[in-house]
Amino acid sequence: MSRSSFDAQVGLQRDTRDAGLFVRTSTCRSHPFVRSAARALAVGMLGIAGYGPASAAEPTPVPPSEPVQSPGPTPSPEPVPSPQPTPPAKAPVVTPLAPTSPAKSPTPTAPAEKPPERTSGGVPVEGVLRFEHHGLFRFRPELLLGGDLGLGASSVPSPLGVTTGVDADADSLAWASIRLRYEPTLFIGPSLEIHLALDALDNLVLGSTHQNAGGDVAFGLTGDAQAPPSSGRYGWKDALTVREAWVRWLAFEALDVRAGRMAEHYGLGLARNDGRCEDCDYGTLVDRAMVGLALSGFKLEAAWEFTAVGATSDLASASSRAADGQPTDLGQADDVTTYLVRVGQYPTTAAEQAARVKLLDEDRGWAVEWSLSATFTDQTLSSSEQTGSSSVECTPSGTLADGTPIQDYDCIRLFRRNAFLLRPGAWFRAEHRPAWGESIRFELEAAGLFGDIAHPQRLEDEDEKEAKAFSGFAFAAQVEWQRQTLKLGFDFGLATGDNGRHLGVNDGQDIVDPDDDGYATNSDLRNNHTITSYVMNRDFHIDQILFRQVVGAVTNAFYIKPWIASEVLKTDAATLTVRFDLLYAAAMRPSGTPGGGDHWGLELDSQATLDLTSGFRASLILGVLMPFDALADPDTGAKGDPAVSIRALLGWRF
């Protein structure tokens, strides 16, 4: 369990005779008010956590666990420290707050009996109330050369010097970004957890929020300060955003209840990806209530997700916004609701993770996990697209930073939608460690998108060509073998494509025309009745340029990627690793590529990474893309030019 420099903990130590309360920090000395407040808080939490008077035989509680997104690859759990022994006392004692430097413990006058260690499933359980602090600071400079592919087709914009005619030879884009993600967890007793995730300056491009941005040029040239970004002022994002807030209750060693806004990760992250990797930029966040049940080694999970509730009172009423109270949903008919059902065998608690590690490292057995999942999404009516400025009486009174119009209650209209989508998924992982330093892993995830939307547009009259059907499929597989410092891997997968005008990632989509009046003349959209493409999650990375930058995500592709990695330097404090990847990608449907070709391209990526035991990681990443005929110019057929990416990734994880 990692802790920050300020680690507050209120714990309960009990033996067969009496109880003691203690408060510990690492930066502050005790204060009478702090001691009194801590004692009152700890005593009050005894009842919540289910602790009664001390007794010789007390039940074994369920251990608090790390917030594991199930199922999928999960790191080995960090060791949970055992409860700290305290000197015997006949009355509750408040230990002074620990000073900055370690303080010597008082020597007891008589040998003290060590209180029994509370465990569950072999995992030590700490006191009533404790915090865990986790987070990551990321600094990421990037240089992209020839990202527009010259004469080829790419969604990467050309430098402004080219488009404005000032510098026709310009071919590079360069920037640097930062992000601080802080994820504290509050554990209340052995079964209750409260999770929070905050992002500060999320993906902020350094230098993009000058305090005089858009103001007087002279002050912009002479000033040297930045302004904190906020939505609609100095940018389109707030400097600090709440990413997650949810609660988890573990009961009876079988029941797992979660509710709130949380990141969701399934399998390899092909469909749902929590975006927690050091190089991730997005993340799947869901609002839901979820119940999990463990029976005879199997896990059964069900969730009700609030995908979109449509019009709410704070957007439809100026008085409601001014009141700053609890907004309300203005009806259930326009709600987009998702139901999730999942079954399988996979670890979700710290005890189960520890058992998995024991099976692999001590018993030398195979660890096999699997899961089947399905989500069902439906919507009958829609109010999310409100009447626009074409109506004099119902002109939007304003817009949000993301472009959402603000309409008065009397101006909101409901449109027929009749949508139903099914997203099945499957995941499988098998891992074996036959000896120390040796391992083999095979992992596979498959996902699909099926269903239909009867009325994607807001049309007054019926249009027989308006309906859209969905039929897409994707899978990804990884094979990895390791012996000592050498790793070999082979990744492969596919995502179906469509013959529509757009790929559906960076360049547009083939489902709905934002301009309802222009829909009647959009023949490409009206004639594409079935959407057969599948777009993988944008945080599912397999390269540096082709799908990450040029296309935007893995779609309409079959790919293979062999790779090799080796630890070239290893000490007690640091490890230096180098890795080389070779990616080849072909188009599943050539008619759906910009150039109408069969082959996307060939990309070589190399990476050197330095890991320190302190949590610091520094990576230097080089990528070279050779585009093929699928990225040729759609008008002239000219082949695209090579592209080069040079990126550095510096992260501090705690």
Image (spheres, grey):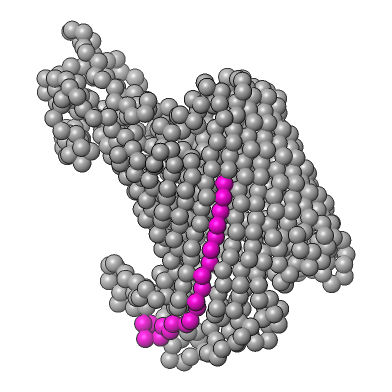
How many numbered callouts? Answer: 0
Residue 419 covered by magenta stretch: yes
In the rendered image, the vertical position of residue 242 relative to residue 167, given as above or below: above
The range drawn in magenta is 408-427
Residue 80, image x and y in percent? Answer: 39, 28
**Horizontal side of residue 53 vs 290, given as left or right:** left
Residue 251, picture quadrant: top left
Residue 17, picture quadrant: top left
Residue drawn at 78 percent across, 49 percent down: 584
38 or 45: nearer the eye? 45
Where, quadrant-wise, is the N terminus in this rendering?
Answer: top left
**Can you see residue 352?**
yes
Residue drawn at 30 percent across, 74 percent down: 320
Q: Magenta stretch mostly in which secondary structure?
A: strand
**Horizontal side of residue 596 vs 127, given as left or right:** right
**Can you see residue 152?**
no
Residue 650, image x and y in percent? Answer: 60, 39
Residue 592, picture quadrant: bottom right
In the rendered image, the vertical position of residue 457 relative to residue 631, given as above or below: below
Residue drawn at 15 percent across, 25 percent down: 55
Residue drawn at 60 percent across, 29 percent down: 432
Residue farthest along the left direction in this orientation:
90
Residue 91, image x and y in percent? Answer: 11, 23
Residue 431 covered by magenta stretch: no
Residue farthest along the top direction in this orientation:
110
**Horizontal side of residue 483 vs 348, given as left or right:** right
